[in-house]
Amino acid sequence: MTEPEAEDRKPQSDEARSAFAAPVGVTSNDDESSTTSEFALPKGLDVPQPTGDAEGSAFSTPHTYSAKQAPPAFTPPTGIPVVKLTKEAPWQDRMRTMLRMPVTERPAPEPVQKVDEAGPAVPRVLDLTLRIGELLLAGGEGAEDVETAMFAVCRSYGLDRCEPNVTFTLLSISHQPSLVDDPVTASRTVRRRVTDYTRLAAVYALVDDLSDPETAISLEEAYRRLAEIRRNRHPYPGWVLTAAGGLLAGAASVLVGGDAVVFVAAALGAMLGDRLAWLCAGRGLPEFYQFTVAATPPAAIGIALTLTHVDVKASAVVTGGLFALLPGRALVAGVQDGLTGFYITASARLLEVMYFFVGIVAGVLVVLYFGVKLGAQLNPDQALGISERPVLQIVASMLLSLTFAILLQQERSTVLAVTLNGGVAWSVYGAMHYAGDISPVASTAVAAGLVGLFGQLLSRYRFASALPYTTAAIGPLLPGSATYFGLLSIAQNNVDKGLVSLTKAAALAMAIAIGVNLGSEISRLFLRVPGAASAAGRRAAKRTRGF
């Protein structure tokens, strides 16, 4: 190869080394102004263009769009209906409606509390919100209602785009001012649970005042009121709670056919069990062992009366003691969380109920086993006559609800309402089951539904929680007798029959929980719910299947 030929083959510039340069020997007919994008139309494809101006922007109106026949994806001429944050409905329903809306569809917050010109102190508002949610969750409130209260506090201080999250032991809330700002997230752990409906009502009153546009509460004032709520003592001393537990057990024993002797025996057994449970709690034992210890004295007294040949219904004594221990409140809250879409919290609550129930079963079963070995004549087929004294049974049911309300530390202003609600529940159950010969599960569900309906209406009338009006009222419906007869059959080696009776008790418990929740939802038909008049209507609770 000659020297001039070698010089011709050398690259003339750096551009010649590009991987996109045309190979040697390949000629291209395209000039520099030709389109090289892969989105360009191929040659030979003729697409008709509109006669008007060409579409040069992604935000311009498509040429296929007609204003007369607009697709439903565009905003209708009447506009999109919004939820008005006014006092036309209780704050619980307004905030629940907001939580069930997507974040992008929620209207802007209308702060009802005065804040500084620089805006609300976001970390302090989130901390206040978490502390309020902690008291509500520790008091036994449902997860949806806790989220509603937390959301109401945030919007009261003008925080938009807030997302509360509630599980059984953890509360968290996240606030993102805008799509380009970093979110602020805070969390709080619930380590101790105390049943005090007076404190629960005080927290609801605080949230109601924060949501009221006519009541100005600063952050410092809200913190002060919250500290007072936490420092307040329980409304009833310990000896009153012990006496209320004894009266509850005595009323339950009369409810299932006992007489005066049975009443006294059941009351003594329940009070002794309560004192033993307090002793175990003072030593730091878990609640499982507290329930186990508290269940043994009523069963032991029933066995002792049978061994001494006292002519009483020992089954009524044991059943009355079980009524004071069955975790009806936790069961209703667990089923309610499951029905409203909080499956993790519902699973944890139901697991807690299972542990408590197993503790009760262990305590009673050990006593019954030794009673059978000692020769106690206990008959699992013995029928509890409760349809022969309807007036006395109604009075006993009302006394049971009254004492149950005291055990729950309710306000004195709510005790009368829940007592009447419990009497109505038992009257409906007795009329359907004994007079109408309807299944006990169906009768229990209907009676519990009325409890939930009346309780929800009373709570909305007073802008308070529904728990003080419903939990104590379901006391007469708890499956104490079915639980006792199932345990007695197992102690007598009749496992199949015992499991059938325990399954009936579980069915009755689920009927109570579902009935209370269904009654609460039916009550919303009589309330003005924000957004009900819009095309979307009231959104359902959380779903996992997208509808």
Image (tube, rainbow, N blue to C red):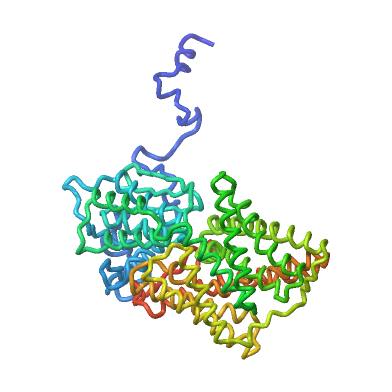
Nearest the viewer among 525 and 56 is 525
Look at 25% across and 64% down and name the residue there. 212
Up-down: is 180 above or below 404? above
Q: Quadrant of the N terminus?
A: top right
Residue 73 x/y as whole percent: 37, 67
Whether residue 311 sits left or right of residue 259 in the image: it is right
Whether residue 487 sits left or right of residue 18 in the image: it is right
Instruction: Give the mark count.
Output: 0
Quarter of the figure with residue 148: bottom left
Whether residue 230 sits left or right of residue 364 in the image: it is left
Residue 399 x/y as whole percent: 50, 75
Q: In the current view of this chain or complex, which residue is farthest to the bottom?
A: 435
Look at 69% across and 79% down and name the residue there. 384
Residue 367 x/y as whole percent: 73, 60
Look at 73% across and 65% down and name the residue there. 304
Visible residue check, residue 546: no
Visible residue check, residue 254: yes
Q: In the current view of this chain or complex, which residue is farthest to the left?
A: 117
Residue 208 x/y as whole percent: 30, 63
Up-down: is 395 above or below 470? below
Quarter of the figure with residue 57: bottom left
Look at 30% across and 68% down and name the residue there. 82
Nearest the viewer among 416 and 170 is 416
Quarter of the figure with residue 379: bottom right
Up-down: is 92 above or below 43? below
